[in-house]
Image (tube, rainbow, N blue to C red):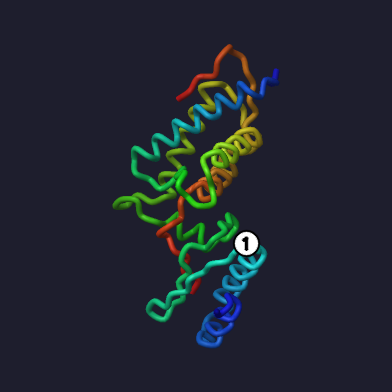
């Protein structure tokens, strides 16, 4: 069975024309993935000259590429996961204001933390991570 | 004065969690899904509880916390 690092190495040779930013993003993804020793099953699928990873075994809330892709997933026309996260966050803020609680940090930072939490708690099946 | 009764806090947070979960399920959004292979429902509540405890200062002025 071909290892994940071998796949990445091969695809790096295939895509030499990519920019430095793209390479940095790839390295970041690999580093994040390799730090999680639990990753066992990655099914690489070649789709229009792109490697698509289906269902990464371990969720990584700090993988920005995956988080951005998940946030931009359309639930409905013109309604993204991000919009729904904001709606849920507003519900939490309503709960906070109704009970006169205080925030330990600013609302902007809290929204970002809340989005990370939502990504962690969501089912990412079907939202495959495109790394190229 | 901060509330020291963690059990009551936990129940209130679970009520909020259930409200959000029901909203997501009713809207057909793929969040708070207990069928996800790596997160079971207990872990989800635990993560949510930790988030609330860390970033929201719970001060109890009344007997019961109002749920949304």
Residue at x-position 39% and y-position 76%: A47
Whether residue A77 sits left or right of residue A101 in the image: it is left
Residue at x-position 55% and y-position 38%: B42
Whether residue B35 sits left or right of residue B28 in the image: it is right
Task: Pick out the residue farthest to the front.
Answer: A1
Residue at x-position 64% and y-position 38%: A105
Whether residue A116 sits left or right of residue A79 in the image: it is right
Q: Position of residue B51 (x, y in %)?
A: 61, 38
Return the residue nearer the eye: A114 or B35.
B35
Return the residue nearer the eye: B19 or A25.
B19
Place residue B59 in its image quadrant: top right
Secondary structure state at the residue bearing disc 1: loop
Mark 1, Cα crowd under 10 Å, few <14 / some 14-19 / many 20+, is: few
Residue receiving disc 1: A38
Q: Position of residue A49 (x, y in %)?
A: 41, 81
Write down the chain letter for disc 1.
A
């Amino acid at each position: 069975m071909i290892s994940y690092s071998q796949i990445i190495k091969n695809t790096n040779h295939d895509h030499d024309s990519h920019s430095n930013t793209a390479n940095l993003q790839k390295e970041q993804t690999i580093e994040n993935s390799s730090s999680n020793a639990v990753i066992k099953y990655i099914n690489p699928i070649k789709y229009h000259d792109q490697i698509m990873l289906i269902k990464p075994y371990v969720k990584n809330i700090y993988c920005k590429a995956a988080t951005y892709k998940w946030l931009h997933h359309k639930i409905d026309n013109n309604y993204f996961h991000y919009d729904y996260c904001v709606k849920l966050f507003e519900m939490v803020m309503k709960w906070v204001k109704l009970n006169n609680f205080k925030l330990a940090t600013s609302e902007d930072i809290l929204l970002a933390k809340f989005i990370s939490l939502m990504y962690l708690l969501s089912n990412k099946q079907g939202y495959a991570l495109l790394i190229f | 004065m901060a509330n020291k009764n963690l059990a009551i806090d936990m129940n209130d947070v679970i009520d909020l969690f259930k409200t959000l979960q029901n909203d997501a399920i009713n809207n057909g959004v793929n969040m708070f899904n207990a069928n996800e292979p790596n997160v079971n429902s207990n872990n989800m509540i635990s993560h949510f509880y930790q988030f609330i405890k860390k970033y929201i200062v719970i001060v109890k002025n009344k007997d019961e916390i109002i749920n949304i």
